[in-house]
Image: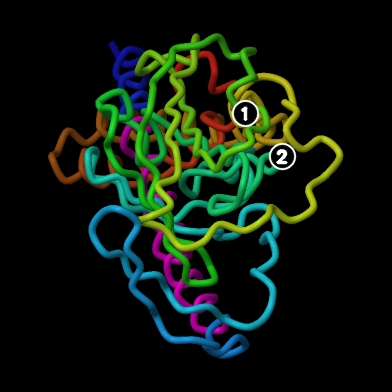
Amino acid sequence: MTLGLLILLFVAYQLWGTGIFTARAQESLKSDFKKAQEQYREDNPLVETPTSVHKGGPSTTISPLRKGAPPPTPPEGEVEGMINIPRIGLNMAFVEGTNRDDLKKGPGHYDYTVPPGTLGNAAIAGHRTTYLHPFYDIDKLQPGDPIYIGTLDGKKFTYKMEWQRIVRPDETWVADKTPDAVLTLTSCNPKYSAAQRIVIRAKLVPTESDAVTKAPALPASAGKSKGDLQGESLSSESQSVPPAILWGIIAAVVGALWWWGFRRWRHPAMWIAGLIPFLAVLFGFYVYLERAIPQGLYSG
């Protein structure tokens, strides 16, 4: 019964406890995003005022242009933009990179694809059941649903969902280069499993977006997969094994002392006094255990 309870608590930590780290990271990322936009506006003043254009439909206001080149691609793990999907209630900062540490902070941009807001295929991955599960309801998107992207230079882009696919993890063609500006979202499928990948493809709506630019120079691997879709983010962290073992031993010792103390002094105060430190060290054990286990074994 004790072992079963500990397993259930670990599952609860994965589904909800991991969100603590993502929530804290999102606060920091959103603050960094605002600061980066302010700095870009200071360094690149306006060169013309907004104008309204009419392209066979309702008038659309185009944002003013600014001097200077677009902001460079941020280092891995740092904020790159904001993604807003009204259909699923998502409004989060996304970072550059899709390794395990990157996706703990929120959605991550595949570094071998073009940045959002440029010509080509910009791909973003996100967790579906852990770390605030940003793409939990991604399967509910319908053709025509808008996806909004905000970038560090203050530009805004609207993409509209075109299709949804369920693919194998090795079907990396979904991240291949495209001649048009498109956005690809990927996550694990089905929920609570990493056996497959769910893919959403959306196309830029020029009349509702700022002007797209040519993508900056990318590594030689640009447009080519680095293994499975989101595969690197689902691998285990071998350096977390020793801390997991250490915290496990500490949790076992604290638990044994708690049990011994309660057996000797059967009083509710003793039970509560032992519960608090046990849960504290158990939380530390779960943190490293979750990192040490390949995430593809249980969720995504």
Structural crowding at the residue carrying mark 1, measured as other residues with C-alpha within 10 Å and reported as few (<14), some (14–19) or many (≥20): many
37 to the left or right of 161:
right
Q: 288 or 124: nearer the eye? A: 124
Above or below residue 224? Residue 111 is: below
Which sits earlier in the primary sequence, circle 1 or circle 2? 2
Q: 282 or 62: nearer the eye? A: 62
Residue 272 x/y as whole percent: 21, 43
Please name the amino acid that badge 2 sits on: Tyr
Please name the amino acid that badge 1 sits on: Ala
Q: 265 or 137: nearer the eye? A: 137
Q: 56 or 300: nearer the eye? A: 56
Helix, strand or loop for the magenta stretch, by majority: helix
- The residue at the point 47 percent across, 71 percent down is 154
Q: Can residue 98 be seen in this snapshot? A: yes
Above or below residue 186? Residue 183 is: below
Residue 111 x/y as whole percent: 68, 43
Q: Which residue is mark 2?
A: 112
Residue at the outermost left position: 268
Above or below residue 80? Residue 221 is: above
- The residue at the point 44 percent across, 19 percent down is 198
Q: Which residue is mark 1?
A: 175
Residue at the outermost front position: 56
On-image quarter of the N terminus: top left
Residue 139 x/y as whole percent: 31, 23
Above or below residue 286? Residue 274 is: below
| SS at mark 1 in the image | helix
- Quadrant location of residue 221? top right
Query: Over which residues does the magenta segment extend?
Result: 13-39
Q: Can residue 133 be seen in this snapshot? A: no
